[in-house]
């Protein structure tokens, strides 16, 4: 599939609709699915030659042409009834290929998500929503086999996110294993204490700590830097640099961090190692 | 499986189970009718299958099926068609599998399956697939693991593959006792066979330590890994061949055998009326086969023949850690006799795990002293008083007359150093570092206990240790007592044993507990040395290998419930056990082996205060075990009523030659009991400090 020559579209009939939705990303699809379920007539359009907008995963050649075409300056499409402004997704795109041969060799083996990994926790509420709205019929879920976290030196570390994974991990020292597991237990104890007020046997995180920054709380728990980054970025999935105090953007509070860990734990269970679901967007269609 | 809360049953469940019981009852009675009348028709056999599918715990039904199989085998024998043989057994496998589906913890079903396979007519190829299914459903199910150990060799599956399987299971979830256990079984076999890659313990064990550390550090609260670690520690410390730890008399010893004179050294003299003295061998583990052909005792060119060696064991078995015989020097010319003892020159001394004792020898001298006429009375004629003012600290330097003997001589310096090879000490030292690190992070009870065990293992390996860890170990056990009151007795026992090891570890510390007994009214029979281990909060006694020389022992004001092991101290003549918590006469059973015992103080204990004698459960040597062989039932029937009501006291004390006994302050001790004692103890001169007439 190339983006330069879109095939000629058949004429659209009927010509009036209750709702016209542009873009086939997840939110747009949910709206159109929900509206058609209530009996509205909907026209669902997408400027891209593929479904899913930036919820899609593309092969390497497709992704570079997508990136290029979406970094153009904004342009307006005029019509007698409305003006449609297309804003670029990316302000500046620079594509470089460090190992063309290797890439060529393995080109067919993987797709890349357009905008970051579409990873959802099993226990995430949006999963329930997708099931309820029926949107799940157009979506394929795949469980995450392994996750890695990259350090500053470009090295990948597997994420020890369960008891068995910590046990098997070859990169953590014995003491780091102990510290990480103890932190998990602390969170687990805190959560189970929250559920049942009367049981006071487990440890509980103080209100003061809950309002502090998550990264500071982790430091206070004497966790070494490597474990901190595993918890912050691979498990709590923080989007922004938590240790850059100058920018101070998107910093998680302990409360948020614990909430995310709670979601993680609810998804992991205690012993099961399947934790996250990768969203593979197939097609969202509505009539 | 595990950790599931029990829910109260709902009414509809109860109705269902009532209906099930109704159906089961009908099946059961029909089945029993068939069984009793040996009916093995097709319908009858099918009925038993139906019964087993509902209730796999019906052992009678399993046995009936075995009978039915034998019945059909006898019928098919003539045409001997392998096809029909197969189908008979295949049917049994199906029934067993269905039963296991109903309850995969059914002993009967697993056993039936084993029985079928052991007949050798069925293929074992499908067994692993079946097992995988059950082990996936519950990875800790020990029935499945047990069956796996049975099936794997039948399938010629290598032990290496099975070992890898345990590793995989442990990686899935290391909280799995069965997997760790199976690993220890497989490794033991592989090490014993010296299989490829398992030739050297020093190669295999460090890797296993590394593996189990992952579990211990990830979750120290999970116990399964700790059990494996304890097994590893045992494998590291254990020396296969039995060793002689100490003896009395020890190597290089100058034994003064006294008729009636003053001893020149209180440590090496032994007073004997009869001219005999015990020769005691103390091994590091229980051994059998100590007798006059495996141990020879040579004295002045003559071999002392036909010595009778007795095992000092609690349960009358012919296996014991301590063996004793009596050497006889009656009517010999007063002079010094060199004696040489040689052990294991012919094979026969074997440990309980089947390892032979290596040959060794030791020598000592017996100096027989002339009997002096008209010398003073001996101990026993006078009352022995245990009060503090009678004891004077032993000062080695003030003993001008006696050459100061080395206390190190009192126990054998074995060739321990060579057997405890370097890798063992290295492995233990590494473990110590690891657990010190863990404990610096967290407060972990089992970690502390493990560290204490490791430190003691380290100290015993490095024999003349220049830096011992007693203080640290005692602190660890002290902590544990506070941390875990429910196991305080165990920690107290361990604390006591370590404390005694500390006391006996050096000459200096032992001398701090050595006192002269001086009684003004008595003569100077040598101001005997008394080892005073009183007021030490001991709940157990140990380190007997270093105390074989002791003739006078004060264990009063401790917390002793048992005196297990005291039977090794064959020279004991005076023993103070007052103010302890001994609960019954059965707790005093070791005294029965102490033939030299003359003075015994068991006052202020709790004998007779408890209606239930817990010694029988606590102590590995309850009287009930030993009673059987030497107890003459006629004796008790014909005995008077007193013997019947005090039979335990009678059993313990009747063969002792006590001259002095203190028993006041026990619930049992009333006038009636005291008159009973006077009746059975013929040599008794003093009872509760009163002279008897």
Image (cartoon, rainbow, N blue to C red):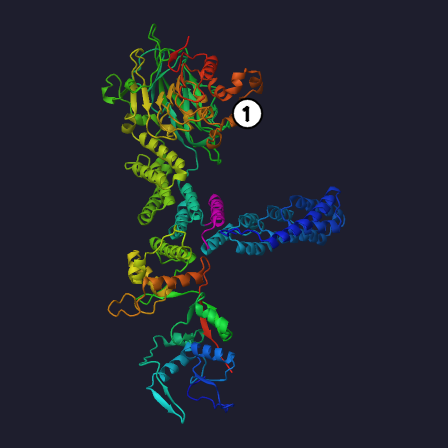
Q: Main secondary structure of the magenta part?
A: helix
Q: Quadrant of the C terminus of chain B?
A: top left
On the image, which quarter does residue A251 sit in? bottom left
Residue B181 magenta: yes
Whether residue A58 can be seen here? no
Identify whether B432 is placed above or below B653: below
For this orientation, the residue located farthest to the top is B374
Residue B134 magenta: no
Query: Which range is magenta?
Result: B173-196
Identify whether A136 is placed above or below B123: below
Residue B605 image offset from top left, x and y in percent: 40, 24
Could you tell me which secondary element the residue under label 1 belongs to?
helix
Residue B586 image offset from top left, x and y in percent: 47, 25
Along the horizontal axis of the image, is A122 left or right of B146?
left
Along the horizontal axis of the image, is B191 left or right of B268?
right
Towards the viewer: B304 or B55: B55
Residue at mark 1: chain: B
Residue B653 image offset from top left, x and y in percent: 46, 19
On the image, which quarter does residue B276 sit in? top left
Along the horizontal axis of the image, is A133 left or right of B574?
right
On the image, which quarter does residue B505 sit in? top left
According to the picture, the residue beneath numbered tag 1 turns out to be B628
Q: Count the marks.
A: 1
- At 33% from the left and 86% from the top, the residue drawn is A74
- At 39% from the left and 53% from the top, the residue drawn is B218
Along the horizontal axis of the image, is A15 left or right of B35?
left
Residue B304 image offset from top left, x and y in percent: 44, 18
Whether residue B380 can be seen here? yes
Identify whether B164 is placed above or below B622: below
């Amino acid at each position: 599939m190339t983006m330069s020559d879109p095939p000629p579209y058949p004429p659209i009939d009927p010509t009036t609709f209750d709702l016209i939705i542009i873009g086939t990303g997840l939110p747009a699809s949910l709206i159109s699915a929900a509206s058609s379920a209530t009996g509205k007539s909907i026209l669902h359009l997408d400027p891209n030659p593929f479904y899913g907008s930036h919820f899609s995963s593309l092969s390497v050649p497709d992704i570079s042409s997508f990136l290029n075409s979406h970094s153009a300056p904004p342009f307006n499409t005029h019509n007698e009834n409305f003006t449609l402004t297309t804003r670029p997704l990316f302000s500046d795109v620079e594509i470089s290929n460090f190992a063309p041969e290797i890439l060529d060799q393995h080109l067919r083996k993987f797709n890349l998500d357009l905008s970051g990994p579409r990873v959802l926790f099993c226990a995430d509420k949006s999963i329930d929503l997708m099931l309820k709205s029926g949107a799940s019929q157009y979506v394929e879920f795949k469980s995450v086999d392994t996750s890695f976290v990259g350090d500053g030196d470009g090295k990948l570390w597997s994420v020890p996110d369960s008891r068995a994974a910590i046990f098997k991990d070859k990169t953590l020292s014995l003491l780091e294993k102990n510290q990480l597991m103890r932190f998990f237990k602390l969170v687990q104890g805190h959560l189970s204490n929250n559920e049942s007020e009367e049981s006071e046997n487990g440890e509980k995180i103080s209100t003061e700590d809950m309002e502090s920054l998550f990264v500071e709380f982790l430091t206070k728990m004497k966790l070494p830097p490597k474990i901190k980054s595993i918890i912050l970025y691979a498990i709590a999935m923080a989007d922004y640099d938590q240790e850059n105090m100058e920018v101070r953007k998107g910093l998680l509070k302990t409360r948020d961090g614990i909430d995310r860990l709670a979601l993680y734990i609810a998804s992991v269970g205690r012993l099961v190692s399947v934790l996250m679901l990768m969203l593979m967007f197939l097609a969202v269609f509505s009539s | 499986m595990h950790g599931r809360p029990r829910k109260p049953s709902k009414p509809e469940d109860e109705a269902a189970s009532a209906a099930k019981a109704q159906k089961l009852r009908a099946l059961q009675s029909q089945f029993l009718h068939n069984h009793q009348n040996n009916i093995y028709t097709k319908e009858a056999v099918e009925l038993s299958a139906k019964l087993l599918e509902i209730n796999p715990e019906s052992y009678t039904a399993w046995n009936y099926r075995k009978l039915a199989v034998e019945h059909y085998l006898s019928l098919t024998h003539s045409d001997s068609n392998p096809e029909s043989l197969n189908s008979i057994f295949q049917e049994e496998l199906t029934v067993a599998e269905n039963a296991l589906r109903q309850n995969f913890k059914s002993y009967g079903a697993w056993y039936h399956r084993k029985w079928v396979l052991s007949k050798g007519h069925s293929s074992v190829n499908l067994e692993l697939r079946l097992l995988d299914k059950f082990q996936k459903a519950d990875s800790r199910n020990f029935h499945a693991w047990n069956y796996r150990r049975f099936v794997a060799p039948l399938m010629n599956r290598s032990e290496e593959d099975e070992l890898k399987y345990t590793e995989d299971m442990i990686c899935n979830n290391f909280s799995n006792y069965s997997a760790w256990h199976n690993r220890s079984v497989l490794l033991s076999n592989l090490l014993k066979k010296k299989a490829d890659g398992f030739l050297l313990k020093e190669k295999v064990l460090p890797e296993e330590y590394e593996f189990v550390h992952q579990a211990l550090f990830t979750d120290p609260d999970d116990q399964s890994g700790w059990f494996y670690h304890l097994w590893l520690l045992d494998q590291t410390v254990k020396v296969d061949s039995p060793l002689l730890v100490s003896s009395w008399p020890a190597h290089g010893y100058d034994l003064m055998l006294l008729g009636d004179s003053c001893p020149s050294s209180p440590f090496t003299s032994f007073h004997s009326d009869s001219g005999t003295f015990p020769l005691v061998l103390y091994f590091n583990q229980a051994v059998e086969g100590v007798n006059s052909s495996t141990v020879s005792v040579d004295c002045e060119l003559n071999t002392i023949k036909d010595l009778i060696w007795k095992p000092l064991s609690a349960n009358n078995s012919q296996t014991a850690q301590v063996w004793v015989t009596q050497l006889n020097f009656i009517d010999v010319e007063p002079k010094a006799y060199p004696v040489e003892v040689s052990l294991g020159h012919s094979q026969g001394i074997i440990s309980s795990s089947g390892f032979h004792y290596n040959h060794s020898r030791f020598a000592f001298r017996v100096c027989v002293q002339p009997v002096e006429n008209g010398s003073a009375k001996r101990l026993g004629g006078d009352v022995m008083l245990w009060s503090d003012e009678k004891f004077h600290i032993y000062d080695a330097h003030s003993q001008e007359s006696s050459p100061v003997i080395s206390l190190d001589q009192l126990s054998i310096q074995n060739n321990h150093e060579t057997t405890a090879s370097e890798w063992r000490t290295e492995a233990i030292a590494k473990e110590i570092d690891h657990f010190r690190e863990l404990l610096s992070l967290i407060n972990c009870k089992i970690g502390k206990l493990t560290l204490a065990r490791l430190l003691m293992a380290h100290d015993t390996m490095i024999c003349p240790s220049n830096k011992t860890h007693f203080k640290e170990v005692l602190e660890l056990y002290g902590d544990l007592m506070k941390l875990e009151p429910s196991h305080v007795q165990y920690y107290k026992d361990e604390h006591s044993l370590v404390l005694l090891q500390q006391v006996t570890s050096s000459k200096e510390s032992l001398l701090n507990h050595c006192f002269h007994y001086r009684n003004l009214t008595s003569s100077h029979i040598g101001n005997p040395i008394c080892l005073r281990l009183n007021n030490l909060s001991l709940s157990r006694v140990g380190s007997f290998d270093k105390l074989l020389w002791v003739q006078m022992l004060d264990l009063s004001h401790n917390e002793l419930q048992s005196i297990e092991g005291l039977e090794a101290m064959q020279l004991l003549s005076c023993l103070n056990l007052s103010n302890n918590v001994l609960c019954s006469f059965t707790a005093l059973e070791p005294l029965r082996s102490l033939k030299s015992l003359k003075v015994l103080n068991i006052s202020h204990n709790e004998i007779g205060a408890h209606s239930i004698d817990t010694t029988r459960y606590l102590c590995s040597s309850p009287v009930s075990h030993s009673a059987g062989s030497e107890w003459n039932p006629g004796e008790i029937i014909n005995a008077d009523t007193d013997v019947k009501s005090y039979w335990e006291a009678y059993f313990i004390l009747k063969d002792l030659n006590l001259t002095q006994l203190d028993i006041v302050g026990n619930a049992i001790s009333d006038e009636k009991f005291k008159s009973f004692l006077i009746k059975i103890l013929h040599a008794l001169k003093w009872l509760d400090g009163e002279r008897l007439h």
